[in-house]
Amino acid sequence: QLQASGGGLVQPGQSLRLSCAASGLTFSQYGMAWFRQAPGKEREFVAAISRSDNIIHYVDSVKGRFIISRENAKNSVFLQMNRLKPENTAVYYCAGDSSVKTYSTWYRNLREYAYWGQGTQVTVSS
């Protein structure tokens, strides 16, 4: 129900835009996020956006370089990644959930998301 795309091989300093298309769910009711998993590491939070895109969070390492956005009319969420670094190399996953949350930092916890895309590989290398 979530389909991620847009990954690829880029050089350091270049940009990529990831997309995640949702189907079979009422997208506007879902908080959405991007996570990533590098080889040998745990999956980690990257960015999250609320249902109405008025609340956005980023992991500190991508602030000022990555931008998360959504278009509810297109059932899609995006991650614009600028000034990419080799350490950004990972499989990037989109995730979504519509349930009521009980603590303020829930968006960082991958266990809070019921729906996941299949992942798209981002490789940053010269």
Image: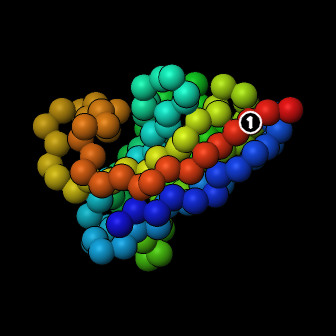
Q: Tell me if 112 is positioned left or right of 70 in this view.
A: left
State the image coordinates of residue 61 (x, y, percent, origin top left). Answer: 58, 25
State the image coordinates of residue 89 (x, y, percent, origin top left). Answer: 65, 33
Q: Is residue 18 above or below residue 63?
A: below
Q: Is residue 55 above or below residue 105?
A: below
Q: Residue furthest front?
A: 40
> In this rendering, does residue 120 appear at all?
yes
Question: Residue placed at 35% from the left, 66% from the top?
Answer: 1
State the image coordinates of residue 85 (x, y, percent, origin top left). Answer: 73, 30
Q: Tell me if 56 is positioned left or right of 5 in this view.
A: left
Question: Residue placed at 79% from the left, 33% from the top?
Answer: 125
Q: Amino acid at mark 1?
A: Val
The part of the image, by quadrant, that contains residue 22 is: bottom left
Which is more toward the observer, 12 or 66?
12
Which is more toward the observer, 38 or 18?
38
Question: Residue placed at 61% from the left, 41% from the top?
Answer: 66
Q: Which residue is mark 1?
A: 124
Which is more toward the observer, 55 or 69?
69
Question: Residue placed at 70% from the left, 50% from the top?
Answer: 8
Q: SS of the residue at dot 1?
A: strand
Q: Tell me if 41 is positioned left or right of 13 in this view.
A: left
State the image coordinates of residue 37 (x, y, percent, origin top left). Answer: 49, 33
What is the tally of numbered marks visible in this picture? 1
> In this rendering, does residue 72 appear at all?
no
Q: Residue furthest right?
A: 126
Question: From the image, which quarter does the C terminus lie in?
Answer: top right
Q: Is residue 32 above or below residue 110?
A: below
Q: Is residue 14 above or below residue 5?
A: above
